[in-house]
Image (spheres, helix red, strand yellow):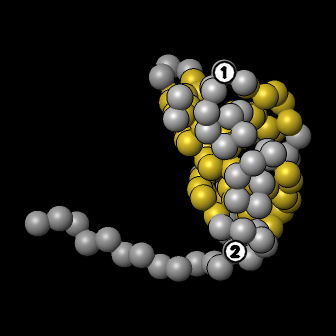
Amino acid sequence: RGTALRVTEMWELLGHTEGVRCCAYAAGPRRLLTASDDCTLRLWDAATGMQLTSWTAHRGFVLGCAFAPGGRTIASCSDDETVRLWDAAGAKLCTLRKHRAAVNAVHWADVPEPTLVSASAD
């Protein structure tokens, strides 16, 4: 017998022009990040549902996104075979080009310091 889970819809976030592939939440700054087939990332205020900013993140579909612990750095990945790092305002920090196929997922592991891992079809 498990614990009952209560799910409540809070916001309908409108803005992407294509399907949304991934979302991530940063508790500290209460931010929500969405990644889409429209090649963009969008940052939202999780308390109000208001879009804070958006930017073209990749040349292909944005397949994954993740906040680093603390919410100040963002990672995104794409079928353009790259992983990109951003600051929380959307300024690009760097592009990682180690994969030879679509990068399907990114995740920050906090062991013992923040470490970015990615998954690809290569």
Tell me the SS state at disc 2.
Answer: loop
Q: Is residue 114 visible?
A: no
Q: In this view, does 97 lie to the left or right of 94?
A: left
Q: In front: 15, or 63?
A: 63
Q: In this view, does 116 lie to the left or right of 42?
A: left
- For marks 2 and 1, the one nearer the N-term is 2
Q: In this view, does 15 lie above or below 90?
A: below
Which residue position is annotated with label 1? 98
Q: Residue 13 carries which label?
A: 2
Q: In this view, does 79 lie above or below 34?
A: above
Q: Which residue is drawn at 86% across and 53% down?
A: 55
Q: Where is residue 113 in the image (x, y as percent from the top left)?
A: 56, 21
Question: Which quadrant of the structure image shows residue 41?
Answer: bottom right
Q: Where is residue 18 in the image (x, y as percent from the top left)?
A: 72, 68
Give the distance between the C-alpha atoms of the residues marked 2 and 1, in whole angstroms.
Answer: 33 Å
Q: Which of marks 2 and 1 is in front?
A: 1
Query: What amino acid type should be assigned to the residue bearing mark 1?
Result: Lys
How many residues crowd mark 2 within 10 Å: few (<14), some (14–19), many (20+)?
Answer: few
* On-image quarter of the N terminus: bottom left
Query: What amino acid type should be assigned to the residue bearing mark 2?
Result: Leu
Q: Which residue is drawn at 61% across and 33% down?
A: 101
Q: In front: 9, or 104?
A: 104
